[in-house]
Image: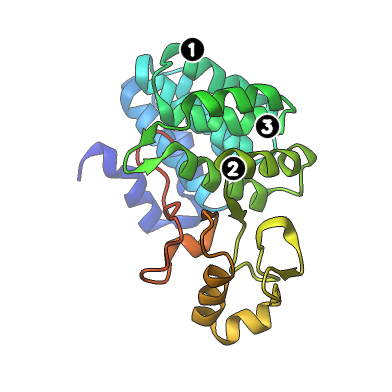
Amino acid sequence: MSELDIPERFAELDPNRMIDRIAELVEADKSLSADLRAAWLRRCAARSIDTKEPAEGAKFYRKVTELVIGEHRAEALVGLSWASLLSGNFEDAFKAASEALAQFPDKSWIKTNLITAAVLTGRTDEAKSRYAAAKEERIGDQTLTDVLLKDLADVAAAATSDPHLDDFQPWLARALDARVHGHLFAFDRAEVAGGEPVFKGGLSDSPTLRDYNPKSFLTNLIWNTRGETRTCRGPLCRAPVAGSGVRRTGADRPVGPRT
């Protein structure tokens, strides 16, 4: 077992205290290299976010920024900004993403965090300007727009409704010249574009009707908006109907920068 695998080993032996034990070890043993300590802390941060404790994740990422330099530090700053977004600390998220992008202005995976943070801190004009300048860029096999939609959905799911977000999403739909649906398979309702209880063609947002025949629900949604550009954010994109034409946002964010 390599030193990098120690967090996973701790997780197997004592999953409830894995983060505490790693954090204690990093603080106690100063003989550990900075790179190794940073790697362990990044895993603690990722696990904190996975267990719905993003504020703890932000604390770990902040420690990582003190241990590494260069692109590794930029990645830690992006992790810090993402954890801050999920925990509702939008100003911290904006500052971290801004610092990362200042160091590496060509990194598209930093821009999505900064645009999201700009929206949520009321810097709407800056968010629109940055999006317009970067919308054709790609992040791995996804477009920047797809990743941004997923990020906005994840942040919205983690926090209460935000007026800045509510204002930005209609603008984004106009910029895309598309209907932007939300979580079409959310637990309490189908979040169709515009938030109407009855969508175009008499399609209800009732989860009972939707779940009775999900395939027919999607078929009707696509048929009722045929000829239009459609995109969605959320769980739908993990399992689209084959041949539906629904643009996929992707189930996972890019590997690396936020873990």
Amino acid, disc 2: Pro
Look at the numbered discs 2 and 3 and tell me whether their residues touch, using CB distance below 8 Å. Answer: no
Q: Is residue 61 visible?
A: yes
Picture quadrant of residue 75: top left
Picture quadrant of residue 129: top right
Q: Which residue is mark 3?
A: 119
Q: What residue is drawn where x is 42% and y is 20%?
A: 73
48 relative to 254 in the view: left or right: right
Q: What residue is drawn where x is 56% and y is 23%?
A: 130
- For the C terminus, the quadrant is top left
Q: Which residue is mark 2?
A: 54
Amino acid, disc 1: Ala
Task: Tell us which disc is closer to us: 1 or 3.
Answer: 3
Amino acid, disc 3: Val
SS under mark 1: helix
- Point out the tag, 1 or 3, that comes first from the N-terminus: 1
Q: What residue is drawn where x is 43% and y is 39%?
A: 22
Q: Is residue 31 visible?
A: no
Reply above or below: 57 against 218: above
SS under mark 2: helix
As measured in the structure, the alpha-carbon distance from the residue carrying label 1 to the one carrying label 3 is: 19 Å
Q: What residue is drawn where x is 65% and y is 83%?
A: 209
6 or 124: nearer the viewer: 124
Picture quadrant of residue 41: top left
Look at the numbered discs 2 and 1 and tell me whether their residues touch, using CB distance below 8 Å. Answer: no
Q: Which residue is mark 1?
A: 102
As measured in the structure, the alpha-carbon distance from the residue carrying label 2 to the one carrying label 3 is: 19 Å
- Point out the tag, 2 or 3, that comes first from the N-terminus: 2
